[in-house]
Amino acid sequence: MTTAQYLVFDVGGTTIKYGLLDDTLQLQATGQCPTLPNEAGHILKELLRLSLAFQADYPLQGIGVSTAGIVGVDGAIQYAGPTIPGYQGTPIQAKLEAATGLPVFVVNDVAAALLGEQLAGGAKNASSVYCVALGTGIGGAYLDHGKLLSGANGTANSVGYLLYDPATQTNYEQRAATLALEALVTPLGVSVPDAFAQARLGKAPFADIISHWAVAVAQGLAQIILLFDPEILLIGGAVSQQGDYLLTLLQNALTDFVPQGLCQTRLKVAELADKAQLYGAFAGIQAKR
């Protein structure tokens, strides 16, 4: 008996990743194409082209789309920042459903990563999980007893805008995103992973730079812990590959921002790397069906 197959996408500012997932969580037929400038609706056209091509070759049961931007209840892009110009208002769900006749689920990429990690990664079997994705910016998503909580207007968890500092005119993500760390180490001729490697060896100035950055990250994490008290606080983004070393830095820094006894949340790193969003898109379309 053939298992049901679902087409899944992950639309980012640089690439559109895609593949097939089935009920056994086997990912196959993967590929990617560049996210070209979104002139004349390039992204939607690519999603339509790929969906129809896959539908011609496979007995698809549905389509899941993880995407940058804030997604409205109608599966359209409610808000998109400068990363993908001209993306706001794109009616992804409506257009894909009309073209294929299949159910379509569209979700923000951080929420998708969280859904994926609960399905097959670092958040399995947890009932209350908050995910913070550290990258070019900082995004958040909250899953409570199987339900994504995104606020009355879909704009909750915009954690990157927390902690605005009038003195420096910067917000949380401008100080604590991986991009902010990259700006500190690039003039020293190293990448962020190389800076971590040097910091692990205790080498100056990298140990201090990484430590100070971890404090900036922990300051925002403390707000989330105090507001939501999640069972697990999941750290995503490429920097999560630093594993236990990163978690130790963050856990130590949190003691300055959360009163003793008030933090029972477990910090974990994401496990599915750049596949998390694809698994999350799959989890969402399965739930919808």
Image (tube, helix red, strand yellow):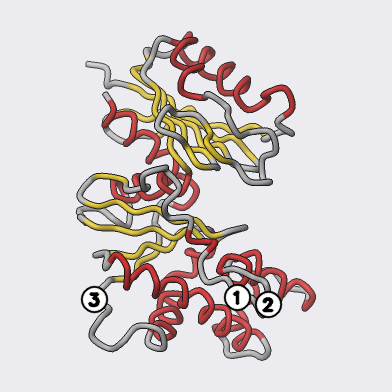
Distance Cα–Cα, label 2 vs label 3: 32 Å
Horizontal and vertical percent position of residue 269? 40, 64
CB under 8 Å between discs 2 and 3: no
In this picture, is 123 found above or below 46? below
Q: Earlier in the sequence, mark 3 or mark 1?
A: 1
Quarter containing the C terminus: top left
Which circle marks residue 165 in the picture? 1
Question: Measured from the top left, where is residue 243 in percent x and y?
Answer: 44, 70
Mark number for residue 264?
A: 3
Q: Quadrant for residue 90, please give it.
A: top right
**Mark 2 and mark 1 residues within 8 Å of each other at the beta carbon:** yes
Q: Are marks 3 and 1 in contact (CB under 8 Å)?
A: no
Q: Secondary structure at mark 1?
A: loop
Q: Residues within 10 Å of mark 3 (few under 14, many from 20)?
A: few
Q: Amino acid at mark 3?
A: Gln
> Looking at the image, is 257 positioned above or below residue 158?
below
Q: CA distance from mark 2 to mark 1?
A: 6 Å
SS state under label 3: loop
Label 1 crowd bin: few (<14), some (14–19), many (20+), radius 10 Å: few
> In the shown orientation, is residue 24 left or right of residue 88?
left
| Amino acid type at mark 1 | Asp
- Expressed as whole percent of the image width and height from the top left, the position of residue 200 reads 54, 83
Which of the two labelled residues, at mark 2 and mark 3, occupies the earlier sequence position? 2
| Residue drawn where x is 45% and y is 47% of the image | 155
Between 114 and 263, the residue placed more toward the observer is 263
Q: Which residue is mark 2?
A: 168
